[in-house]
Image (cartoon, grey):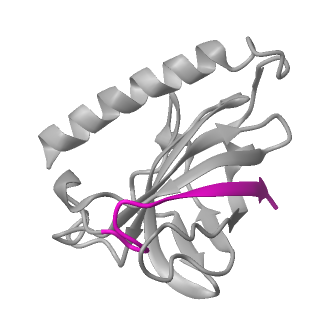
Amino acid sequence: MGQARVLCAGSVALLLLAGIGCAGSDGGGELREVNFTELLGTWTFQIQSNPSCPGPGPSGALVLQVHQSATDVSLLGLGLDNATSTWSIGGQSGGYVTGWLSLSIPGIAWINLVAGDPVDGGAPSPARVATLNGTVTADLGFSGTLSDPTLAQGHQPIFSTACVYQVTGQHD
């Protein structure tokens, strides 16, 4: 688990740096630094259905409750890795989140939705995981995708195997 976490953190670092370096270059506005406390609280996401995906897919609003502390902040952003932040969908409890939110916006958001409660500080095995990838905008909006993994990626899907949904959201 430690080695996977390190590899994952390294990949995230590259993604964050790439996103931070390019965010203002498309005419989308100047980068601004935010205090991590601006990212705390409730984020609400709307997921577009994808008729090409097998199964019913996600339904209802996806809600993240971000409850992190100053100890979760690094040069790369706000780390969501100690199971204090949670997600729910359609009013039903989902689990906890891991990942990153950039402290430079517009910037990268990479958030794993992990189904269930942590077991001994880690994900249940096999973990059921879906991933939000996208951009946090200057007004604390979100635009990106929600992806369920293929079974070959080492996780079980939450909504529908190997499917991608378009997502928009906003910090409430």
Residue 100 placement (x, y as % from top left): 50, 42
Q: Is residue 33 magenta?
A: no
Q: Is residue 163 magenta?
A: yes
> Residue 42 versus residue 67: which sits nearer the camera?
42
Q: Does residue 99 sit above or below 104 in this rendering?
A: below
Residue 14 placement (x, y as % from top left): 41, 21
Q: Does residue 109 sit above or below 16 in this rendering?
A: below
Q: Residue at x 17, y 70 (%)?
A: 126
Q: Does residue 110 sit above or below 163 in this rendering?
A: above
- Residue furthest to the front in view is 52
Quarter holding the C terminus is bottom right
The answer to which image quadrant residue 116 occupies is bottom left
The residues colored magenta run: 157-172
In the picture provided, is 47 more to the left or to the right than 18? right
Whether residue 69 is visible to the viewer of this picture, yes or no, is yes
Q: Residue at x 39, y 56 (%)?
A: 82
The answer to which image quadrant residue 31 occupies is top right
Whether residue 75 is visible to the viewer of this picture, yes or no, is no
In the picture provided, is 113 more to the left or to the right than 140? left
Residue 35 placement (x, y as % from top left): 72, 35
Residue 32 placement (x, y as % from top left): 78, 22
